[in-house]
Image (cartoon, rainbow, N blue to C red):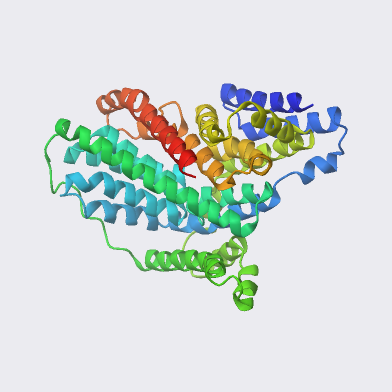
Amino acid sequence: MSLIAVLAIVLAIALGYATRINIGLFAMAFAYLLGCFVMGLKPSDIIMMWPLKIFFVIFSVCLFYSFAMVNGTLKKMAEHLLYRCRNVPYLLPYAVFLAATIISGMGAGYYTVLAFMAPLTLILCQRTGMGLIIGGLAVNYGALCGANFVSSQSGIIFRGLMVNAGVSENQAFLNGLAIFVATLILPIIVISVVAFFGRKNETKVTEPGAATPPEAFNGVQRTTLFLTLLMMGLVLAGPLAQLVFPANATVKFINSKIDIGLIASLFSVIALLLKLGDERKAIASLPWPTLIMICGMGMLISVAIKAGMIDDLAVWISGNISPILIPPMFGIVAGIMSLFASTLGVVTPALFPLVMPLSQSMSMNPMLIFVCIVLGSQATSISPFSSGGSLILGSAPDEETRQKLFPQLLLRAAPLGFVAATLTNLVLAFAM
């Protein structure tokens, strides 16, 4: 039964990849067929496997953050950050990384940030002499890192998956912070190495003042920015206060009443009352394909867990792989999987449930394995065959730039990211 469940997951991924149909739809179909007709579960049991909490949190948070997208607040912020570094070419990669991290961390999400920052970055590469590969790495790493923040899209999903896998809320928050810090430090190292070895091949600044000064924030955008920062502060205040004052009853009570999904719903109402954006446009901009993929795979993974897949895989791994190599091996497997499937929708929902039973049976730190999975999975996202790399490639201003960029993403950036993530995971495994 475990083998059948594994094959169903693989088949759902393969069919989604081959047909370009949302993997989550195949996953829901296989969850129904496998659960009801092979395992004898009731249809109501299958429906109850829909990850309602994850769906609600992602929906609520993305709805509020979508106002900042619809009214141009996040795009305006990116333009201001990049404009201020236009005359300092050697700082531009870090400026691009920082801008993408901040904008993504404020809720725009990975794909949205790439959609409007990748064109800006590639134009900056042309005008300032910054290399295409380092520009692509900087914007891709920044979008990933910011999205991994505990109150942003990927970070929320990771935390929800951890809680579903048996991790406490506070520990999931700490694990999420560890993932964010790891995906913040590694890109800075990689960007610095690429900048150091590629500096001799860089051209000099050709148009130091070519960037057009962006317009100032209008009243709606300033209000949106204030609300976004306020919501992030409220969401982070409770868990952080709980960590600092674990025995304080008042802090514990307040933290127990804080839920990011409900807070985001409240702030969405405030945004609508203040007329910060059009309701229909905000709802239309939600990441519906990602939601379907995550929740559909969540149903199939739940059926697989019922079939005993997690326990069987944990036993096999613990009996065949040295404990010190388990975290980096998870990273390698995640990196290979992410070449064909989404980190959020497939890789982490499939691998995160393995972490707790495996770490408990082998007395390992689960945080380490969670971090290695995300580092490995996101390492190959810049490949031109992945969604992130294809967005960057599609943002090229002309065909000549696109032809130069393709081999650099495929043969240099993607392998570099994978090797860097694998070495980082090995270092973390031996250090912890």
Residue 77: x and y in percent read 33, 57
> Against 147, is 219 above or below?
below
Quadrant in the picture for the N terminus: top right
In this rendering, the count of numbered labels is 0
The residue lying at 58 percent from left, 34 percent from top is: 323
Q: x%, y% of residue 30?
A: 74, 29
Residue at point 58%, 67% (across, down): 266
| Residue 341 spot, x, y in % from top left | 55, 30
**Which image quadrant is residue 76 in?**
bottom left
Residue at (41% x, 28% y) in the render: 383
Q: Nearer the viewer, residue 147 or 368?
A: 368
Query: Relative to residue 35, is residue 165 depicted above or below?
Result: below
In the picture, measured across the screen, residue 194 lies left or right of residue 389, that is left
**Residue 382 seen by the camera:** no
Q: Specify whether 126 is left or right of 6.
A: left
Residue 413 in sight here: yes
Q: Position of residue 429 (x, y in %)?
A: 49, 39
**Which residue, as the protein is rendered here, is positioned at the far bottom?**
250
| Residue situated in front as seen by the camera: 426 or 166 | 426
Q: Is residue 11 above or below residue 378?
A: above
